[in-house]
Image (cartoon, rainbow, N blue to C red):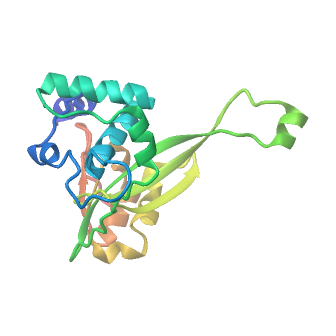
């Protein structure tokens, strides 16, 4: 019965709020041991932050420099910004550590699907029959750990495959390690609920307002 608030939360995902933590500001300049050669001004964290902004907003390097400069000006941050040349040079040598999440005990997952448009038709097919008027779609079904945001399961299917039919594949052989599974109304079907019930997995699936209890 919370479709209104749920709808508002989906719209809020598109709102833009950017801020810089005090720790990020303090670590903006390079403070490690100096090496022979050119002077290093900015920390790896600063370069990584600029490149993340570039990726999110699909910006060229020069526009990334301008974007971060404008952001710092609005936030009143008294730090210089790496120029586009520095970003380009440092990007290739940037060392990023990917943390391995280790969760003890069972996990809670969120299941969902998304459509993928398939591009790049084979050369022979194009020469023989030309380009297709309609693009081919595939469906990607995933299960995500609620706490770590790690994708723990995934299946790629044709676009006509029902979401609820893929629940068994998403929980897979690791069902005994899953405490609960959350999904939207697409998973409010007997076949998906039965899969979860048979594996003793708590179901967090919002039923429609006119839902009735099933004898099954």
User: Please, which residue is most extreme toward the front here?
Assistant: 36
Task: Locate residue 119 relative to residue 17 in the image: left or right.
Answer: right
When the figure is inspected, residue 93 is found, relative to residue 104, above or below; the finding is above
Give the quarter of the image for residue 215. bottom left
Viewer-closest of 207 and 65:
65
Viewer-closest of 123 and 166:
123
Residue drawn at x 72%, y 26% is: 133
When the figure is inspected, residue 183 is found, relative to residue 68, above or below; the finding is below
Label tally: 0
Query: Can residue 15 be seen?
Result: no
When the figure is inspected, residue 144 is found, relative to residue 42, above or below; the finding is below
Residue 137 at what x, y percent from top left? 60, 40
Viewer-closest of 158 and 165:
158
Residue 134 at what x, y percent from top left? 68, 30
Task: Locate residue 78 relative to residue 187 in the image: left or right.
Answer: left
User: Please, which residue is most extreme toward the right here?
Assistant: 128
Residue drawn at x 40%, y 47% is: 90
Residue 120 at what x, y percent from top left? 70, 40
Query: If the image is split into quadrants, where does the C terminus sit?
Result: bottom left
Viewer-closest of 214 and 176:
176
When the figure is inspected, residue 15 is found, relative to residue 179, above or below; the finding is above
Give the quarter of the image for residue 42. top left
Query: If the image is split into quadrants, where does the N terminus sit?
Result: top left
Residue drawn at x 40%, y 33% is: 84
Residue 56 at what x, y percent from top left? 37, 36
Query: Can residue 55 be seen?
Result: yes
Residue drawn at x 36%, y 30% is: 64
């Amino acid at each position: 019965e919370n479709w209104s608030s749920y709808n508002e939360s989906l719209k809020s995902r598109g709102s833009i709020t950017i801020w810089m933590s005090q720790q990020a500001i303090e670590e903006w300049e390079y403070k490690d041991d100096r090496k022979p050669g050119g002077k290093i001004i900015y920390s790896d964290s600063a370069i990584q932050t600029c490149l993340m902004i570039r990726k999110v907003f699909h910006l060229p390097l020069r526009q990334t420099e301008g974007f971060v400069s404008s952001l710092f000006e609005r936030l009143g941050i008294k730090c210089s910004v790496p120029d586009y040349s520095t970003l380009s040079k440092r990007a290739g040598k940037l060392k990023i550590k990917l943390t391995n999440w280790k969760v003890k005990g069972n996990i809670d997952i969120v299941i969902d699907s998304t459509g993928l448009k398939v591009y790049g038709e084979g050369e022979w097919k194009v020469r023989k029959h030309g380009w297709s008027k309609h693009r081919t779609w595939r469906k990607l079904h995933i299960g995500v750990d609620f706490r770590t945001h790690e994708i723990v399961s995934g299946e790629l299917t044709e676009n006509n495959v029902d979401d609820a039919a893929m629940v068994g594949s998403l929980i897979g052989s690791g069902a005994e390690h899953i405490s609960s599974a959350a999904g939207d109304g697409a998973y409010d079907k007997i076949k998906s609920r039965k899969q979860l019930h048979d594996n003793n997995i708590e179901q967090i699936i919002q039923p429609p307002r006119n839902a009735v209890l099933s004898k099954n």
